[in-house]
Image (tube, coloured by chain):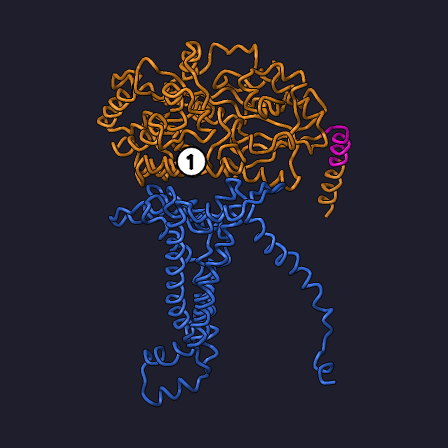
Amino acid sequence: MASTTSKIYSYKFLLPAAVVYLIFFIVPTFLSFFFSLTIWTLSDWKFTGLDNFRIFLTEPSLNVGLRNSLVYAILTCGLKVVLGFLLAAFLSANLKTKGFLRSIIYFPNILSTIAVGIMFSSLMQPSRGLINVGLAAIGIQGPDWLGNPSLALLSVAMVDVWKGVGIAMTIFIAGIMAIPRHYYEALMIDGGSSFHKLRYITLPLSRSSMNSVIMLAFIGGIRSFDLVWVMTKGGPGFTSDLIASIIYKQLQGGFYGISTAGNVVLFVIVSLLAVPMYRFLTKAEVDL
Amino acid sequence: MKRSSIALAAAMALLTVAGGFAADRQKLVWLQWANDGAQKNLDAIIAAFEAKYPIDIELEFKPGSAEGENLVKTRIAANDMPDLLSFNSGSLFQVLNLEKNFVDLSNEKLASRLVDSFKSTVSVSGKGVYGIPYQPIPAGGILYNKKVYAQLGLKVPKTWKAFIANCEKIKAAGKVAVIASYKDDWTAQLLLLADFYNVNVANPKFAQDYTANKAKYASTPAALRGFEKIQEVFTKGFTNKEPVSITYDMAQAMLASGEGAHYPMATWVLTSINQNYPDKINDIGFFALPGDSADKNGVTLWMPNNISISKTSKHIDAAKQFLDFFVSPEGLAAYMSVSTPDGAFAIKGVKLPDNVFPAVKDILVYVDANKTAPALEFLSPVKGPNLPQICVEAGLALKTPAACAVEYDRDVEKQAKQLMLPGW
């Protein structure tokens, strides 16, 4: 009898959500595993075994893409964590303008990524863009931000941080707000400084929000695509290609089978990195 | 209050009139490239057509390059094609499964008006005619500023060596010798694609062997020259600063003003130079991309892009009427009422007016001497989609020309396999 009483709602309530999930998530996922093994023209397909995986994995730009994706993910993730945490710690203090400052930092996040990309492309134009014109005014010759092969990816990563740091900050603020006041009071009675507050209370006790930020930013970074595509199209040449932009290029070329295979590879890579990372991070969490 | 209600009533009256008027007119939707340099000429044809027939043409725009191709492929797969489509002829068009998706025009009267070399680029192994020429026949090569040439006392080069010597002098005079507009990466391919006349002279069987997986860019010295030329103009310092930040439009401004002396491009750019810098169009000349020997100097011709009719269209007859009008003397007269064409038409019996741009006259010299070859993409169905980026790599010396050729051969392999060609 206990089993029927513990079930408050009928499983039938699950049905609408389950159907949507099945049609738009489960079915396409399995179809993509299938089509990754074919030469596919969208209307017709021919089975080719693992040929698509062989072609995708020997793609000359894939090495660059893998390395770039990792660099991009680690760089944007690291900066978002550090900057987001410092901003959050600063803006949880009793400042009069903190609401205003928080909104300003959060604001870029509301903008469409495409619009941000187009805006920064023109700001970073080497001879007429606002950034280099500004630098020239104080006597510095700015570089070709998006045209220099060794700089293009870093420029895009900086824009990504500018756009995404607001989310990290918000998550950190929520975490910091949840820390009970009496820890700080105890530290003050013991004569600790503000630095001690940050180092020994705020930092360790916002560990769970830090984990969320790291996971979100890292996975977001490794499968990042839109900003790079708008700003450099993976160029100059293939120097700022990410895994996702390489996959997209296969799609553009009409190689639907190969691009599906690429997505399966990306799925495996993200899982291989994300699952152990999640395990590792949650182990180090501290209960409040 | 009163005023706004009157305005509303007036607006509704207008709507009813317009509605009643539109009811007996058919509407065709044409999926067309955004920002085409000759859009005004096309608009003139549309206006003349709409005045004569009870059919309206509505334009829907698509981006150029791979992005636009992808959009078309997706819309075909989703059974969502508009009535009319403008698209590249040759290898890129072949990918779209013409027999299944487009209306065969070979039994229409208009087909007899098209030149055969064009028809072969819009047919499937010689069968059917799936499009009409959208523009005059473009030629690929070097567009140059005649004023700069006159100032520096230069002569039109017939060999690559002479071209390099000219570039040295232009560079010494403080000007940009070769304009590189790699922000629009498709423009990086022109030095390679327009070099095909020279490849063809050296290896007349290259296109055939290349399609059959027997000849490669990396192992054919004449073909490899294309990548070498792209790199040489960069390593010798002939190109402008920051090539990756310069667009196709900016390059036109540089050429027109004489800030840059040479622009490797096809002549489809002339119409838009004429529109934006009408007082400079007579300063622009054209010469074929020089090869290694002066007596084998000739030009690579493109085939015009095409307009085709989707099989899913509900107004196929109206669409045929439009295409028929497009290639009729009346349609062409409307086209030329805006500006003179930037090349010869691929339509039989059309004479070019005497006042064509000087650069077009330069092309006709090669055509009259029969020193022409079609670009590779009209002889072979395989063209790798990553060629623009690979050419940028060569053009910024990120890789050696040989490495670029190997990379491109691999890119081509994917395309050939997707097309399921024999021998791959």
In-front residue for pair B402/B253: B402
Identify the subunit bearing mark 1. Answer: B
For image coordinates 56% across by 22% down, the residue present is B133
Write the residue at 35% across / 90% down: A189
- Residue B44 percent across, percent down from the top left: 59, 22
Q: Colour of chain B?
A: orange
From which residue to which does the magenta span run?
B14-26
Quarter assignment of residue B72: top right
Q: Which residue is mark 1?
A: B387
Q: Secondary structure at mark 1?
A: helix
Q: Is residue B404 above or below residue B38?
A: below
Q: Is residue B37 visible?
A: yes
Residue furthest to the left: B172
- Number of marks in the rendered image: 1
Say if residue A105 shows up in the picture: no
Q: Nearer the viewer, residue B296 or B33?
A: B296
Percent from the top left, x then y, of residue B85?
Answer: 60, 31
A249 relative position to B43: left or right: left
The dominant secondary structure in magenta is helix
Q: Nearer the viewer, residue B46 or A139?
A: B46
- Please state the horizontal and vertical placement of residue B365, each as a whole percent of the image: 41, 11
In the picture, one chain is blue; tell me its letter: A
x and y percent of residue B232 in the render? 28, 31
Q: Amino acid at mark 1?
A: Leu
Up the image or down, A108 lies above or below A235; here it is below
Q: Does the magenta portion include B84?
A: no
Q: Is residue A101 above or below residue A31?
A: below
